[in-house]
Amino acid sequence: MRILTGLQPSGKLHVGNYFGAMEPAVRLQEQGEAFYFIANYHAMTTVRNADELRDYTRELAVDFLACGLDPERSVFFRQSDVPEVNELAWILSSVCPVSMLEKAHSYKDKIAKGIAPNHGLFAYPVLMAADILLYDSNLVPVGKDQKQHLEMTRDLAGKINEAYGEGTLVVPEPMISEGMAVVPGLDGQKMSKSYHNTLPLFGDEKPSKKLIMRIVTDSTPVEDPKPVDGSLILPLFRLFASDDDYAKMVADHKSGGCGYGDFKKRLAEAYWEYFAPMRARRDELIADPGYVEQVLATGAEKARVEATKVIDRVRKAVGLA
Ligand code: ADP
Ligand code: TRP
């Protein structure tokens, strides 16, 4: 079974990205042949500075490896190192109704936010379909927000197969992490870089802990019990703490006698401890950029072997070869 997913290098990674995307991807490596890539073509729809795109790409590579992506087991590559994806995107474009793209939520949301629509943003789902179909992927783990893009991918594969013969493209199965609770941001909305409410995955110690200490809480006096429902501290603490520490934190909320400052300190400590091994691994990787480049180069080579097989098959099927 081939598992494939991509992450955009469009900013610093945060704790929501870790629990929503990276940690599940790392776990899934056990279950099949994983192809994980850095979606740098996709990031071009929002990142407009070459150095920034390069930096985010390198950082994402380092961070994903630090979080446990195992390059011996999985194929890890940069999207743009396999340019065949653009050819497949064109072939898919030719069977893709404009009306399908006009219905895309992510596109409509961006327009609603006042982002000027460019063709890349409009065609984004077609390139994403090409990412998936170019590797005969069977399973695509993504967050809920990507569900519609996967439906489009299945639709486009179906249209190609209908026009050019069954088996031209493999129709993938989505794996939507519905059960995965959305990680709340420091203001209680969904944690997202667009809301400026993130806790960085790998930030510096003082500023990161400061962000936690600034979480807004109610004005319950120290000696009184604190509300458990609607707490922002508890769901975050749950992610980092042991069962015992979490139970104690809940009990201390209910009994009163501990202040929010104390709770936040415990949260800050737990957060810092949780990522300590990954931070150490990350420091090693940063000190060895040659290794990271080598991983991506090897990944690109392996990915390209698979991509070539599929694109050759498709070129024949559609009459380009
Ligand atoms: P952002 O919302 O910060 O722009 P992205 O949309 O780039 O993040 O998301 C990258 C991945 O991280 C996606 O798989 C998404 O589902 C996951 N993700 C992002 N924010 C969260 C969150 N708060 N909780 C759980 N998963 C998240
Ligand atoms: N659109 C995805 C996101 O924003 C990233 C992505 C690009 C992707 N191509 C993909 C995810 C292919 C899965 C499969 O999160």
Image (spheres, rainbow, N blue to C red):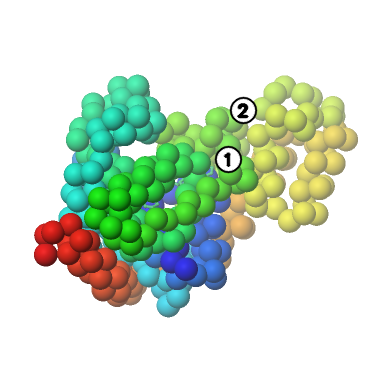
Left or right: where 105 falls relative to 134: right
Instruction: Find residue 182 and name its label.
Output: 1
Q: Amino acid at mark 2?
A: Val
Residue 20 in percent (x, y) is at 53, 49
Mark 2: few, some, or many residues within 10 Å (few <14, many ≥20)? Answer: few
Marks 1 and 2: CB-CB under 8 Å?
no
Q: Secondary structure at mark 2?
A: loop
**Mark 1 or mark 2: whose residue is earlier in sequence:** 1
Residue 69 in percent (x, y) is at 46, 67
Question: Which quarter of the figure has residue 261?
Answer: top right
Q: Nearer the viewer, mark 1 or mark 2?
A: 1
Residue that appears at 26% across and 73% down: 305
Mark 1: few, some, or many residues within 10 Å (few <14, many ≥20)? Answer: some
Q: Amino acid at mark 1?
A: Val
Residue that appears at 18% across and 57% down: 318
Vertical placement of residue 125 versus 273, above or below: above
Left or right: where 61 falls relative to 213: left
Residue situated in front as seen by the camera: 177 or 96: 96
Residue that appears at 55% across and 30% down: 189
Residue 187 showing in the rendered view = yes
Residue that appears at 70% across and 40% down: 234
The residue beneath circle 2 is: 216
